[in-house]
Image: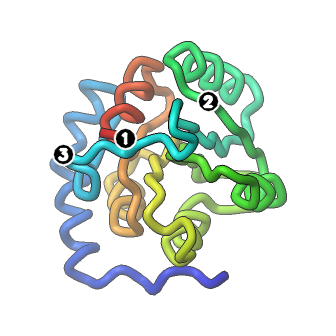
Amino acid sequence: QKAAPPPPPEKVASARKEASTGTPQLQKTGFYVAMARHSGMRIPPRNGQRHSVFIIEDDKALTELVGEVLAKAGFLTRFARNRTEINAEFNKAPLPDIVLLDVSLPDADGFQILERIRGNPKIKAMPVIMMTGKSAVTDVARGLSLGADGYVTKPFKISGLVRAVNTVLG
């Protein structure tokens, strides 16, 4: 599958503006969420019962912590640490309802993975929250302009991450 076409200049400009105005929110709440795509619309669980969260993160301790907290919050969790595991998970049914995506992976770049998701007709509408240590306005703007539904910076408050997932899912 190919990557989505680059975002139009006006979307990049809008994302850059949104990213810079969101910086105080990021500092105050520990996360930053763009509500552009899912405002007012609840996303039903694909399996009909519980939402499934696909966590793409290479830090084992962080993955376990996030997985445990999300499971206690009522979510099903799936995990991948590298490109091979990511591809395998996207080929398993049912698809996840939302993706938490790290930017820095050992063999992949999260922004490129986001582009591939947005370029794949089967999963392009799937909500994606970037979960990363990259908190510069340019990084946030890049994630949002490529179609991320949220942006959570590390270190983050676990409650903020759960809130971000619930917000994006409606």
Frontmost residue, 170 versus 65: 170
Q: Residues within 10 Å of mark 3 (few under 14, many from 20)?
A: few
Mark 3 or mark 2, which has the lower sequence index?
3
Q: What residue is pinned by disc 3?
A: 40
Q: Secondary structure at mark 3?
A: loop
Image quarter of residue 40: top left
Q: Are marks 3 and 2 in contact (CB under 8 Å)?
A: no
Between the C-alphas of marks 3 and 2, the distance is 23 Å
The percent coordinates of residue 14 (x first, y second) are: 19, 68
Q: Residue furthest right?
A: 84
68 shown above or below 94:
above
Q: Secondary structure at mark 1?
A: helix
Q: What residue is pinned by disc 1?
A: 169
**Rendering colour mode:** rainbow
Mark 2 or mark 1, which has the lower sequence index?
2
Residue at left offset 68%, top offset 29%: 63
Between the C-alphas of marks 3 and 1, the distance is 10 Å
Residue at left offset 20%, top offset 48%: 39
Inspect the image, locate mark 3, and give the three-letter code of the amino acid beneath it.
Gly
Q: Which mark is residue 76?
A: 2
Residue at left offset 23%, top offset 56%: 36
Mark 3 or mark 1, which has the lower sequence index?
3
Residue at left offset 30%, top offset 42%: 42
In the rendered image, the quadrant that contains the N terminus is bottom right
Image quarter of residue 57: top right
